Amino acid sequence: MKSQPDWRAALGAMPPGGIAVFQPARLPLAGRRIARALLEEAAVLGGGQVLSFPGGDLLLGSAAAPGQRAAQAIGGLLGTPPETWLLPQGQAAVEARGLAAQQAEPAKTWSLAALEAHCAALPIRDFARLTFFAEGEGTTPVAQRLSAAPLALGEPDLEAMAGEFLCRRLLAALTSPAERDRLPALRPGLRLILDLPPGGLAQGSLLRAGAADDPNGPVALLPLAALADPVALDRLASGLRQAGWTVGLLAPDPMALHWVAAEEFLWAVPAQAAPPMVRPPRLIVLGHPAPAWCRVPGIWHEGEGPPA
Amino acid sequence: MSLTASLPPESWDGSASMRDAMALASLARECVTSGVERRVLHVRLSLLPARLREPRHQRLLREALHPLLRPTRARLYELPGGDLIALSPPPGEHLEEVRHVLARLLPEIPAETLLPVLRLPAEAARLLTVVEAALGLDSAPPADPGETSPTLPAPNPGEIDAARRALATANLAAFLRRQGIWRLTSNDAAPRPLWTETRIHIPDLAAALLPGRNLMAAPALARRFRQAAERRMLAEMAAPMEARALGEACLPLSLVSATEVEFWRLDAVLGPPGRARLLVCIGAADLLTDPTGYALLRRLADLRGWTLGLDELDPRLLQRLPAARLDAALLRLRFRPEMLAGDARARATLDAALPADPERVILTGADTPAAIAWAWQRGITRFMGRMLEGQPTRF
């Protein structure tokens, strides 16, 4: 924010009976933008203003009624309402929150060229990640996943772009003798889960994993976005199955399980507190520690890695 | 809008033959459900060599047919493509008579081929096939000319960054395309306008800003390019004069653009009455890339009072995203000829994926009578496409 007015002065100038609303930046991009817009609307209606902190946190000071309404709307839309304090009673609490928010690292904005350069320069050790999965009550690993760690860019589009780029680097390293030792050491004999970019592997470089349609073959995980072209996905999936792979879809949100009819795929979703209402026959739950509902047969959940 | 809308578009001829075809199709189905018997004579004039298909020949045939059928309970239907169907309660001797007369008039083709007789309900499926083939007879619309040459190299991220900077101040007027979304029922003489879609013609814009590059070869970059263009379009639309003139508008947007500052400015300028007339359509690919964002936008649309639709569904994608499982107020489904060609099982799968309420579907790519017929059979009456666009747009 250019020429940021001093937030303390702005709050101090609020007439009594106003409200302070603090919205932390910890939200996905769409959520951050929606929260900001609703707070801006309240500022217009309530004679106040919205102040931004370097890390993206927002502070609204305005008349009580529109501020309260905006806070409620944000809570309804995003699940968690922002913190609110009536003024002047809450003045000290708001100041404490503001001081903390001031310390945050400025949020980085990426140009596409900068992001590509960043992904190209990142050492493999810094993003290659090997995670282990157990099934049911057990703790013995039944599978290992080689993937690129997310960069926490906060924008699904940029994250997908970076993810695809890093994923290609991992695959290249897997097949290059010179680079292979920079990857985490795969456990021999343990079933492999390997992330693939949306278009799969480059033409002609289909890694043969074993006998066609082997139910215990290694798992190729494709991003859910690959489903946007169902014809291409079907072709790609049948090619992979022919080459001995089990094909899975990697969804960024378990909500996709409700929406998408793709039961012939194995699914991988991030862990959430409550189990999804639709449960495919085979499910991989990502994230550690795994919630209790994952500890049933048919669900692979992320566990501690084996001792090094 | 209402002034131009009262004029029937030129390409829509009221299509008596289409209505005949639809009536025949539902009649064939009724015969199956009720078991009522009918005899059908199919006069396959579409098989005649071109020299015998001139209007005077048609007139001659009709003149021969009418006196034979008038005193009977037979009904004559004309299908798109020119075939005639005469339908009569059994035993239908007069149909045989008609057959003899026509066979004499047209000795070039054996009567078994030219003039088959069908029995309903036993051969309802054959009649339905005939009707659907006739509906598809109108030549398929010409494929879009290749908009970008596939041999051109994809742009690199730096070029997209530069294009995005240029877009921030560009005037997009020359790259906006407007097209109507219409209501057309089988009782309408002319389609009625529902919304006007405004979209950016990305291939033209890319050709102007990224000459010598094939943007579509880099889908992720193409999305960023499109988003920047949409922000610019929204910024222009949010000017108070423009926003007031927006009316019943449909905006196909990417998910990201629908939460951008520019969209919120438009949302604010429109106010509750304007928002109620706004339809925002998000591509299904965006829902797959960011399900969380889509769910959020869906709730937001309800809160703010505009309508959120899911865009760019085709039959294959709809089967992957069946309406009963999706949370979408409205779907835009692209018509594909294979929707008529598939076997019974494929059709049943597609039908099961459609929303229970046909009002929630807009059929896009309605360029042929076959598309309209397919929709009407399913109660769908909202359309976009060349069949509806015979009139100059209001812009």
Image (spheres, helix red, strand yellow):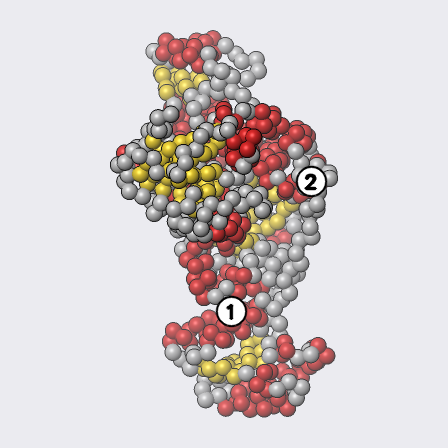
Q: How far across and how far down the image is residue A178, in percent?
A: 56, 30
Of residues A73 and B187, the one nearer the viewer is: A73
Q: How far across and how far down the image is residue A83, in percent?
A: 37, 20
Q: Residue at x 26, y 36 (%)?
A: A137
- The chain letter for the residue carrying disc 2 is B
Residue B224 is marked as none
Q: Residue at x 67, y 31 (%)?
A: B159
Q: How packed is label 2: few (under 14 Cα within 10 Å), some, or many (20 or more)? A: some
Count of all numbered marks drawn on residues in the image: 2
Q: Residue at x 43, y 27 (%)?
A: A27
Q: How far across and how far down the image is residue B385, in percent?
A: 60, 55
Mark found first going from the N terminus, 1 or 2: 1
**Figure quadrant of the N terminus of chain A:** top right
What residue is shown with label 1?
B22
B356 up-or-down from A190: above or below: below
What residue is shown with label 2?
B153
Q: Using residue B183 as the reference point, say whether residue B48 is left or right of it.
A: right
Secondary structure beneath label 2: loop
- The chain letter for the residue carrying disc 1 is B
Q: How packed is label 1: few (under 14 Cα within 10 Å), some, or many (20 or more)? A: many
A152 up-or-down from A235: above or below: above
Q: Residue at x 36, y 16 (%)?
A: A85
Looking at the rendered structure, the kind of residue marked 2 is Pro
